[in-house]
Amino acid sequence: MTDSRLFVHDVERNGTTRDVVLIVSMLAVISALHLFTAVRPETMPMHLLYRRLYYLPIMYAGLTFGRRGGLVSAFAASVVFVPYAALSLGGLTGLHVDNMYEVIMYLGAGIAFGWMHDREVMRTADLRQVSGRLEDAYRTLEERAIQLMNVEEYTQSILRSITSGVLTVGPDGSVATANPAAEHMLGLKEVEMVPRRVRTFVSNDGGLDDDIVRVLNGRLPRIVREVSLVVRDGRTLHVRVYISLMRDIDGRVLGGVVTIEDVSEVKALTDQLIRADRLAAMGELTAGVAHEVRNPLGIIRASVQLVEDVSCDRERLLAATKVVKQEIDRLDRVIKALLDFGRPSSPSFSPVGMNDVVEDVLLLIGRFASQAHVDIERRLESPLPQVRADADQLKQVLVNLISNAVQAMGEAGGSIVVSTSVRGDFIAVSVLDDGPGIPPELLSKVFDPFYSTKDDGTGLGLTMVHRIVDEHDGHIEVASKLNEGTRFTVSLPILRERES
């Protein structure tokens, strides 16, 4: 680099010397022409031509060295021309004043052509400066482009490597990209999914497309739920989907991101453990159910013995048979509640009265609670609108919540308040206990699968509760304070007339 700069400098220096020699030579030649041409009337036209030849070195100097070079050359031409004009061409005044004007024109030409050179040099400098800036900007853009390409390649490598399926969707809900894991799960190539809505390339999307639209429309900030997808080849996938908005650095919504995690094996294991947990809970309830059955049987036996006494009057006979019917109905309710809890079934939605569900559950679990020295208080709002639900599954939810509350209070016992109320467009069912409460650091984990504070617990009871509530388009909340108690609140949407 240093050698090249020296070479350029030498070339410029040699070029300058050559230009100076050329200008001096032209001035000398023109002056010699004046000196060696005799001043006669017939040679005056030649002298007029010679004095105008001075403009050549002046213009060349101005265009080469700028205003300074033009002035120096004009001054040099004037110094040579003025004495000769004064002595041989009639002077600078009077009839020959044009000689003085010629000298002034020399100076004017030097300044004019020098200014033209300087202006061009300034423009060149500006252009070079702009060119330098453009080159710097280009290099910066090139570096940024390389960085973006590296980031994009890195991001693509991550998407290709993760085992979860990732779909990006545009503002209209159509798929924009799909990673290899999503292609493998859905049995389709990316080109077969872009740009189409999810519901168009699967046999049954389980409401996934509608959830995407809810998030894109801003109705929900994000959605996390489990969905059953039936793909084109007939396979059923149990997946957990995470749907969230995708924004740029300025916060503008670009679309959404859908992460799909295959939980088919986990769901199968979870269902198996839930069944085991349900059987264990049924074992705990056996004692209470036996008591609830034994009491009505004793009453029925006494009533039958009363009927056998033929000497009794008709009024006593009717009273005895009425008691028998009541106790049989009570037995039927107990057995029905027990079967509803133990029967694993798919949701079957119908109009359901929440107070009726609560009464059935309390009938089933009342004895279990009394044996643990726990009092259960009802606070049921009436009349109460119906909900669209599966009554059997709602009973599973309440049995689980109340059983957990009873077990949490231990041998010391306590009290539980079960209440129902209307909250806007929802029916709220609350289970409040005065037990030891849940530590704050554990409160966020209570619905996690396989998490349990009981030595013999499976950690799936509240997971099952959360899933059932989600399937009913409801939500469940938990609030707790240490040494004060815990409240679980299940909220389900009210049944509308068009739904009914």
Image (cartoon, rainbow, N blue to C red):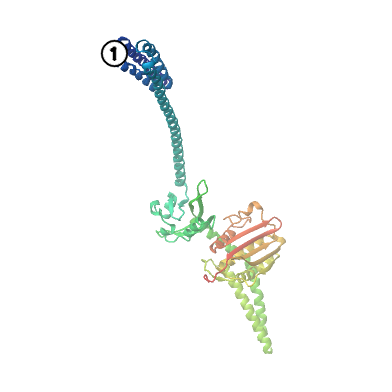
**Residue lying farthest to the right in this orientation:** 412
Residue 59 falls left or right of residue 494: left
- Examine the rendering and report whether any part of residue 328 can be seen: yes
x, y percent for residue 319: 67, 84
Residue 295 falls left or right of residue 85: right
Q: Which residue is mark 1?
A: 41
Residue 498 falls left or right of residue 478: left
Q: Nearer the viewer, residue 196 or 283?
A: 196
**Residue lying farthest to the front in this orientation:** 94
Q: Nearer the viewer, residue 73 or 216?
A: 73
Position above or below: 323 against 413: below
Position above or below: 134 against 177: above
Q: Nearer the viewer, residue 459 or 151?
A: 151
Q: Nearer the viewer, residue 292 or 17?
A: 17
x, y percent for residue 211: 50, 58
SS state under label 1: helix
- Examine the rendering and report whether any part of residue 4 can be seen: no
x, y percent for residue 323: 66, 81
**Quadrant position of the N terminus in the picture:** top left
- Choose top left, top right, bottom left or bottom right for residue 330: bottom right
Amino acid type, callout 1: Pro
Position above or below: 254 against 137: below
x, y percent for residue 470: 55, 61
Numbered circles on residues, count: 1
